[in-house]
Image: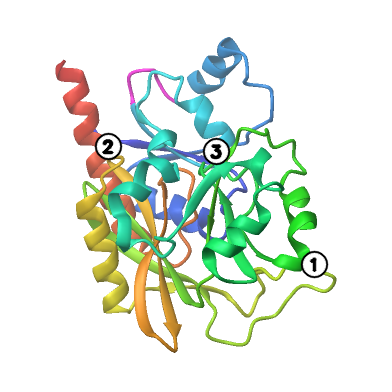
Amino acid sequence: MKPSWLIEKDVFEDNHDKLIEEVRRQGMIAKIVDYIPFKYDDLKELYKMCDKFYNSDDCVIFYGSLNLGRKIRKTPWVPGVYLNERAFECTSYYPVLGNKLIHHNYTMLPYGDLFRMKDKLYENFHSNKIFLRPNSGNKQFTGMVIDIDDYEECVRLAGFYDVEPDLLVVASPVYPLDKEWRFVVVNQEVISGSLYRDWSKPEKLAPGCVTRDYILMNSHSKSEECDDGMAWMAARQAALLYNPDVCYTIDIAKIDSPMGVSYGVLEVGCFSCAGMYGNNIEDVVKAVSAAALKEWEEYRKE
């Protein structure tokens, strides 16, 4: 018995073909699903779709979007999807990782309080810039650096997609990020790592951008295996402290400031719905598949 993979079409285009090829090279089945939004909201339609690919008692690993991943959780497949959403909220892992975090000095408050608390936030962090992100890993809005002069406009922009007033948000100081890496963790072992952003070159802002935030431009986007030993060490230390799922990801950042160089955790996220960038796909497929099969075998014994 070997696991089978269900890979959503056109989600992570950089690694889509390479992932499929590697799964099949390792002797497993990889099938492609073309997700149609809203079609599978009904469980009957979802199960019909799933039955076209694999049997309900098969060992299946999903890789694709959050939208479809949430639906796959409702299927009987084991493991199905590695998407423990509650564990990837800042409120779950910030208190555990503490000073291992880049944003270890933070304030949490509801989105609806942001306008009222503007002056207090900037006073707390003794700066004219703050970093703002949602507590949830569901990306209700993109994390951004906000200059005090742009604050109201940026907060309104963050709430453009009907953000509820009670959505918990995290505010913290702005740190001079130098590089960012994504690591894949399986059973608390760091399997692979990839650089995905390099801020060491002068920052470019998109024309007409009103926020002073980190805009992902081509000069910053990278995709190569991690060769920084300190980044690996930071990921391994974090993995020993926090274990939210069998398979998951840890994003590590390097800060290079006049105060010195340091490394810390930017974010912890789900495996099934995270881009792999330049990670070693062979190692990732091998480790995730082995973990999935073990989980499936244990489930079948119960």
Q: Nearer the viewer, mark 3 or mark 1?
A: 1
Main SS category, magenta section: loop
C-alpha separation, residue under disc 3 versus residue under disc 1: 29 Å
| Labelled disc at residue 66 | 3
Q: Hey, what amino acid is under mark 3?
A: Leu
Circles 2 and 3: CB atoms closer than 8 Å: no
User: Which residue is labeled 1 in the image?
Assistant: 210
Closer to us: 256 or 31: 256
Query: Residue at the location (33% across, 51% down)?
Result: 285
Query: Residue at the location (22% across, 52% down)?
Result: 241
Q: Nearer the viewer, mark 2 or mark 3?
A: 3
User: Which residue is labeled 2 in the image?
Assistant: 292
Q: Can I make out residue 143 in this image?
A: no
C-alpha separation, residue under disc 2 versus residue under disc 3: 19 Å
Residue 302 falls inside the magenta stretch: no
Badge 2 element: helix
First reached walking from the N terminus: tag 2 or tag 3: 3
Badge 1 element: loop
Segment colored magenta = 54-58
| Labelled disc at residue 166 | none
Circles 3 and 1: CB atoms closer than 8 Å: no
First reached walking from the N terminus: tag 2 or tag 1: 1
